[in-house]
Amino acid sequence: MTRAAFFILTALADRPRHGYGILREVEELSDGEVSLRVGTLYGVLDRSTAEGLIVLDREEAHDGRLRRYYRLTDEGARALAAEAERMATGASAAKERIAEGRRATGPADRPTPHGPGLAGGLA
């Protein structure tokens, strides 16, 4: 699952939203790190609909324009939960490795912040 798809499905996890609402929600969920283009959004919506992860919930006229609201399906919720679990497992493994690396590297193995000592050797 792409990062864009992950955030779009997450935006739809709590309620149906229309395109612009999804864009705003994705930006908020990602703390501004993911800013989707309209073409990317509708490409993911089309693929996700074809895969059965989302469905068209309803259409409403707003200011003379038609808004399509999408919602997550049960299959979409399962796929999103599986991806979230996969990401959490990966993040946990990375954190463990980082912690192990810090424990395994003793003070003598760490480079000194000052470089060579007074005699030109390593401090």
Image (tube, rainbow, N blue to C red):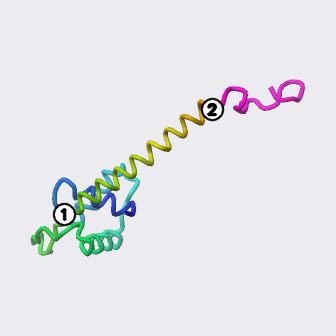
Crowd band around label 2 with a 10 angstrom C-alpha radius: few (<14), some (14–19), many (20+): few
Q: Residue at x 18, y 63 (%)?
A: 71
Res. 116 image quadrant: top right
Q: From mark 1 to mark 2, how far is it between C-alphas?
A: 46 Å
Left/right of residue 25 with respect to residue 36 in the rendered view: left
Camera-side residue: 13 or 37? 13
Left/right of residue 86 with respect to residue 121 in the rendered view: left
State which quarter of the image contains the C terminus: top right
The kind of residue tagged 2 is Ala
Q: Are marks 1 and 2 in contact (CB under 8 Å)?
A: no
Residue 65, label in figure? none
The location of residue 77, given as percent across then percent down, is: 23, 58
Res. 119 image quadrant: top right
The location of residue 92, given as percent across then percent down, is: 44, 42
Crowd band around label 1 with a 10 angstrom C-alpha radius: few (<14), some (14–19), many (20+): some
Identify the mark nearer the N-term, 1 or 2: 1
Q: Which residue is mark 1?
A: 73
Q: Residue at x 32, y 70 (%)?
A: 44
Asked if residue 48 is among those painted magenta in the image, a careful observer would answer: no
Q: What's drawn in magenta, residue-wise?
A: 105-123
Main secondary structure of the magenta stretch:
loop
Q: Which residue is mark 2?
A: 104
Q: Secondary structure at mark 2?
A: helix
Q: Residue at x 39, y 63 (%)?
A: 2
Q: Residue at x 23, y 70 (%)?
A: 52
